[in-house]
Amino acid sequence: MPNWIDIFSLTLTLSLISSIVYAILLVSRQVSESITSTQENLKNKGYTISREGMSVKTAKRFDRSDYVDVTQRGFVKAYGAASFGKDNLGSAGHQESNTKRNGR
């Protein structure tokens, strides 16, 4: 026959387990609601996130000339930043002054 300590221990153990399960469910629900609200906020800003990926809504439509302009601008910037075709050591006079300074 169980005494009062056994009944108290069973009640305490069951209440502890049920509290842990309830806390896990509460946290998972809050995380789910947070994700949903974040997705709604991003959707209002024009970003749609789904399992397949992300899409961005744009209000502008670009035609072929816009794409060509942007591409040409990118090529011009890349050409300006490139080091081929440039003398990395400087001009011949600059090279000569370095040689004189070093005593060679």
Image (cartoon, helix red, strand yellow):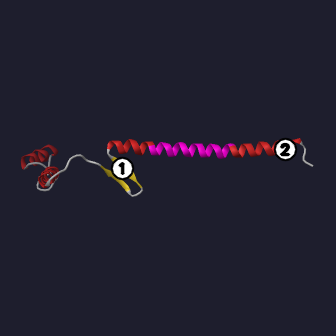
Query: Where on the picture, by quarter, is residue 38?
Result: top left
Q: In the image, what residue type sits under mark 2?
A: Ile
Q: Which residues, given as a range, are shown in magenta?
A: 19-36
Image position of 8 with respect to 56: above or below: above
Image position of 83 with respect to 20: above or below: below
Residue 103 percent across, percent down from the top left = 15, 46
If you read the primary sequence from the N terminus, does the residue marked by circle 2 or circle 1 appear first?
A: 2
User: Total number of numbered labels?
Assistant: 2
Name the chief secondary structure element in magenta: helix
Residue drawn at 11 percent across, 48 percent down: 90
Q: Which residue is mark 1?
A: 48
Q: Residues within 10 Å of mark 2 (few under 14, many from 20)?
A: few
Is residue 25 rendered to the left or right of residue 8?
left
Q: Is residue 20 magenta?
A: yes
Taking the view exactly as shown, the residue that stands out farthest to the bottom is: 52
Residue 57 percent across, percent down from the top left = 29, 48
Q: Which residue is mark 2?
A: 7
Q: Nearer the viewer, residue 59 or 96?
A: 59
Residue drawn at 38 percent across, 51 percent down: 49
